[in-house]
Amino acid sequence: MWTLARIRRVIEEMTGAEYTSPSGVWRLLKRHGWSRQIPTGRAYERDEKAVMTWRSEVWPQVKPPPSTAGQ
């Protein structure tokens, strides 16, 4: 995922121009016609049954254990 911090770094590496704040990068992008890219909704092809199976069977095996630092 592109973030303003990543875009700022790319701009600096490619042009040498430094932007000190994310808002400056955002203003630059808007000036050039960019907009936030947010999905309008869930994919039409989404398989709800497969998602529920993955959440109940796979995710519990790969998610990190709860932190016990505060106990």
Image (spheres, rainbow, N blue to C red):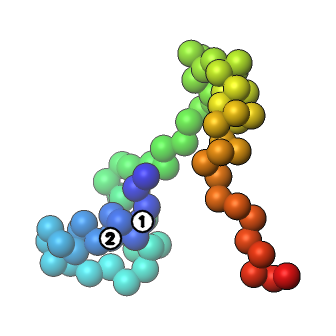
Residue 47 horizontal side relative to residue 27, left or right = right
Closer to the camera in the image, 60 or 11: 60
Q: Residue furthest right?
A: 71
What amino acid is found at the position of numbered circle 2 in the picture? Arg
**Residue lying at 70% horizontally and 33% vertically, measured from the top left:** 57
| Relative to 60, residue 58 above or below | above
| Relative to 5, residue 71 above or below | below
Q: Are marks 1 and 2 in contact (CB under 8 Å)?
A: yes
Closer to the camera in the image, 6 or 31: 6
- How many other residues sit within 10 Å of disc 1, few (<14), some (14-19) or many (≥20)? some
**Residue lying at 43% horizontally and 61% vertically, measured from the top left:** 3
Residue 46 horizontal side relative to residue 32, left or right = right
- How many other residues sit within 10 Å of disc 2, few (<14), some (14-19) or many (≥20)? some
**Residue lying at 43% horizontally and 80% vertically, measured from the top left:** 21
Q: Residue furthest front?
A: 61
- Viewport quadrant of the C terminus: bottom right
Secondary structure category for the residue under label 1: helix
What amino acid is found at the position of numbered circle 1 in the picture? Leu
Quarter of the image where one finds residue 41: top right
**Residue lying at 40% horizontally and 56% vertically, measured from the top left:** 2
| Relative to 46, residue 12 above or below | below
What is the count of numbered marks?
A: 2
Q: Which mark is residue 35?
A: none
Q: Which residue is mark 1?
A: 4
Q: Which mark is residue 8?
A: 2
Secondary structure category for the residue under label 2: helix
Which percent across, then down, holds residue 65?
70, 61
Which percent across, then down, holds residue 60?
70, 45
| Relative to 40, residue 23 above or below | below
Which percent across, then down, holds residue 64?
65, 59
Closer to the camera in the image, 49 or 41: 49
Residue 17 horizontal side relative to residue 44, left or right = left
